């Protein structure tokens, strides 16, 4: 309630901050600009004042390269997609949230009509409108319009800052579901960045008995060991099979891990993963790096490994992510290493690019 | 058809009370919708139930008369501005349920379970397809191949029911299946299971002429239970005749208590049972058999993503000859005669011709 009153006060006396947005023109060329406040285009939509936005490697990639694969920033685009906010307006048909509710935002709106949508895979929608994937604007802005069912109410004891971590947590939930981790199983996670760390935490919540976090940075592994991993491993610049053999020996994973998740996108990690997973096990590609890599396909074949891609999040993932935060099963607060004012957004991007901290949040333009 | 009405429709206002009245001409209310000129509408067991009892769970009333019909084919008459897959003149089969697309089941790919589903001919006001013009979302229309008639197009709906059952059942190549019921759905379950690679497909029915048809249609074998035979007797006799260790799969398309019991008992250990047919709400059930044999039992309701597409694929090229299932065609004005024909158990599928082709 207090936040809402403050918001109204600011809206009437300081309209300059209303819908200030952080916009990418081209690589390393960003600007702040007022954009028209969005209006509700459907009775099922809600308007949300954005409170906090986290930055992801993909945001940084657009800032540095101006593109990811075939998605090219051709026109100025608002960045950001990992956000939490407060509902300020609801359409006539909205039932699940009301004005004043604090929510985690699921930033991709599917078409609901294509074959993937109708068959329960809306993350693979033909016409997905995803925040900060060209040509669609992102959430580093004052106000965001969303369909009701893509806003998830945060329980009272969950902060808006934690709410901004629900997005990467939902990514981890989706990855772990793809890995089909069952209680008592063993899992290795390549990469101890935010997604890798959250995969460890979700795997733990799913009952994994052994969770090995792998990274080349000692400080990240130190954190992983305190966070959710039962073991850590530092690979060396040797053949993938060698790294794999040493990993299995040091962690006591006789025969290999039930599941291996790659949250790094790095070619050597992917290669090592195939040699780490057991016969008949599951390998999930969550991380994104080089589009084409050298891959140990013979091992995949002879070990009858199931290899699955994982892309964003789908049905039920956000709900489960909120539940994990609300119940304390996953601690996302521990990953927040800094919060900056909206005006300092560019600095936050620089920090993330240099690998500083784990998750940096940018306060919304109307935050105190 | 009475040309003085712009959109004549068959309304049911109570058991045995049907009339053809004017209905509102539909407009394109959504840019993704189309308006169809309905060609044929099929009669299903549920229609007969409505005709005799006014409804199944929810009933029609004089205050809220309901346009009947849900198995239909039509021709595209006009299209919304965002429609990309259909053009005027396309001949289509209709998937007659409109889910909300926003709830959990919808987003999880099980839109047949949408709590806000608007299904054709569902009281109080989800009107059906027995009218000249009908509005429907683009993605719930399926273009018929050139060699399939609009009359056959009606059969895509019950074929989709059979496809949904077989997909839930995870029919695998080489399995042995027992199908209880040789009405339209049971026959189509046999045809679809066979098309999906089943080895033995045994149809069971109390009607010898239906079994004869089944033998010519898709089933590899048939079985006629004795009148008054118990579930246990039926199961034993089926096993003796056809299976050494029991059937791999049972598709139950009657809803009859003794068939349900026989289905559980004819299954092998670890077998799968799919309840397709709807009958009594509560029945006596051999639950200990289910437990001891670790049977996997699933409910089955209508159809969802991909079922219509696969149904059309199986019907195209004549892999499943649905034309043979159409045993009677009545004109629009004789709709109640169409319902009575089905009520009497005559033939297999009766159609109502609504529009010109």
Image (spheres, rainbow, N blue to C red):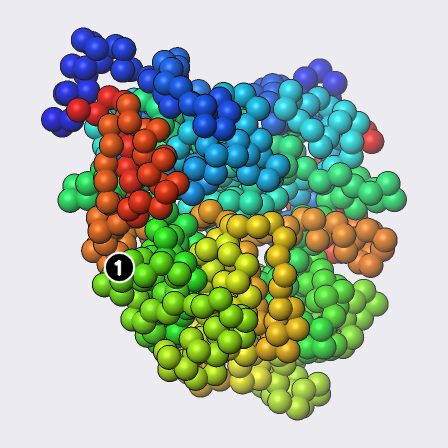
| Residue depicted at 51% across the width and 25% down the height | A26
Which residue was labeled with disc 1? A223
Q: Relative to residue A185, is residue B268 depicted above or below?
A: below
Residue nearest the observer in this picture, A82 or B76: A82
Percent position of residue A73, x then y? 54, 27
Percent position of residue A252, x then y? 37, 82
Q: Secondary structure at mark 1?
A: helix
The quadrant in which the C terminus of chain A is found is top left
| Residue depicted at 24% across the width and 45% down the height | A336
Mark 1, other Cα within 10 Å: few <14 / some 14–19 / many ≥20: some
| Residue depicted at 37% across the width and 42% down the height | A354
Does residue B258 appear to the left or right of A54 in the view shown?
Answer: right
Q: Relative to residue A35, is residue A277 depicted above or below?
A: below
Q: Is residue A266 visible?
A: yes
Q: Relative to residue B82, is residue A166 depicted above or below?
A: below
Residue B129, quarter of the rendered image = top right
């Amino acid at each position: 309630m207090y936040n809402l009153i403050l918001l109204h006060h600011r809206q009437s006396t300081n309209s300059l901050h209303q819908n200030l947005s952080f916009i990418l023109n081209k690589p390393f060329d960003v600007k702040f600009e007022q954009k028209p406040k969005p209006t509700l285009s459907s009775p099922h939509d809600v308007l949300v004042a954005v409170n906090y936005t986290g930055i992801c490697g993909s945001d940084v990639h657009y800032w540095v390269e101006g593109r990811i694969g075939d998605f090219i920033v051709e026109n100025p685009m608002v960045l950001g997609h990992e956000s939490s906010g407060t509902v300020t307006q609801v359409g006539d048909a909205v039932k699940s949230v009301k004005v004043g509710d604090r929510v985690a935002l699921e930033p991709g709106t599917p078409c609901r009509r294509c074959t993937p949508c109708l068959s329960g895979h809306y993350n693979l929608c033909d016409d997905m409108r995803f925040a900060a994937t060209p040509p669609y604007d992102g959430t580093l802005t004052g106000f965001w319009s969303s369909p009701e069912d893509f806003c998830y109410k945060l329980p009272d004891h969950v902060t808006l800052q934690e709410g901004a971590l629900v997005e990467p947590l939902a990514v981890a939930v989706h990855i772990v579901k793809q890995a089909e981790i069952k209680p008592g199983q063993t899992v290795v996670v390549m990469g101890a960045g935010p997604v890798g760390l959250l995969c460890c935490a979700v795997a733990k919540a799913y009952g994994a008995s052994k969770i090995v976090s792998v990274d080349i940075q000692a400080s990240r592994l130190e954190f992983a060991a305190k966070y959710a991993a039962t073991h850590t491993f530092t690979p060396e610049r040797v053949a993938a099979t060698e790294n794999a053999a040493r990993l299995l020996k040091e962690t006591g994973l006789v025969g290999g891990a039930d599941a291996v998740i790659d949250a790094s996108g790095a070619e050597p990690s992917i290669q090592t993963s195939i040699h780490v997973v057991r016969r008949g096990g599951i390998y999930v590609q969550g991380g994104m790096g080089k589009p084409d890599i050298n891959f140990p396909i013979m091992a995949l074949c002879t070990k009858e490994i199931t290899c699955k891609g994982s892309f964003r999040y789908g049905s039920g993932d956000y709900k489960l992510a909120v539940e994990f935060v609300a119940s304390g099963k996953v601690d996302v607060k521990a990953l927040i290493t800094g919060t900056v004012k909206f005006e300092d957004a560019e600095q936050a991007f620089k920090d993330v690019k240099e690998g500083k901290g784990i998750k940096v949040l940018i306060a919304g333009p109307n935050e105190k | 058809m009475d040309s003085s009405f712009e959109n004549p429709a068959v309304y049911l206002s109570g058991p045995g009370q049907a009339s053809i009245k004017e209905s509102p001409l539909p407009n394109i209310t959504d840019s993704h919708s189309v308006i169809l000129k309905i060609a044929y509408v099929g009669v299903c067991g549920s229609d007969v139930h409505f005709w005799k009892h006014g409804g199944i769970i929810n009933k029609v009333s004089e205050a809220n008369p309901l346009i009947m019909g849900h198995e239909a084919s039509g021709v595209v008459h006009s299209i919304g501005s965002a429609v990309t897959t259909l053009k005027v003149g396309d001949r289509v089969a209709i998937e007659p349920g409109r889910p909300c697309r926003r709830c959990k089941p919808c987003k999880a790919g099980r839109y047949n379970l949408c709590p806000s589903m608007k299904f054709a001919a569902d009281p109080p006001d989800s009107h059906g397809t027995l009218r000249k013009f009908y509005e429907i979302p683009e993605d719930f229309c399926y273009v018929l191949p050139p060699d399939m008639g609009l009359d056959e197009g009606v059969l895509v709906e019950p074929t989709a029911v059979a496809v949904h059952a077989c997909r839930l059942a995870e029919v695998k190549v080489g399995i042995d299946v027992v199908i209880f019921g040789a009405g339209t759905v049971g026959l189509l379950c046999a045809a679809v299971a066979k098309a999906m690679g089943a080895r033995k497909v045994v149809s069971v029915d109390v009607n010898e002429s239906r079994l004869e048809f089944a033998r010519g249609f898709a089933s590899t074998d048939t079985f006629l239970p004795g009148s008054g035979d118990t579930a246990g007797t039926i199961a034993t006799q089926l096993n003796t005749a056809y299976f050494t260790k029991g059937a791999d799969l049972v598709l139950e398309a009657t809803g009859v208590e003794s068939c349900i019991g026989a289905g559980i008992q004819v299954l092998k250990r670890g077998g799968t049972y799919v309840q397709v047919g709807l009958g009594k709400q509560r029945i006596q059930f051999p639950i200990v058999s289910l437990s001891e044999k670790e049977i996997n039992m699933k409910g089955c309701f209508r159809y969802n993503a991909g079922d219509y597409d696969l149904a059309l694929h199986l019907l195209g090229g004549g892999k499943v000859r649905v034309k043979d299932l159409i045993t009677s065609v009545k004109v629009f004005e004789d709709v109640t005669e169409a319902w009575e024909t089905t009520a009497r158990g005559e033939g297999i599928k009766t159609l109502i011709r609504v529009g010109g082709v």
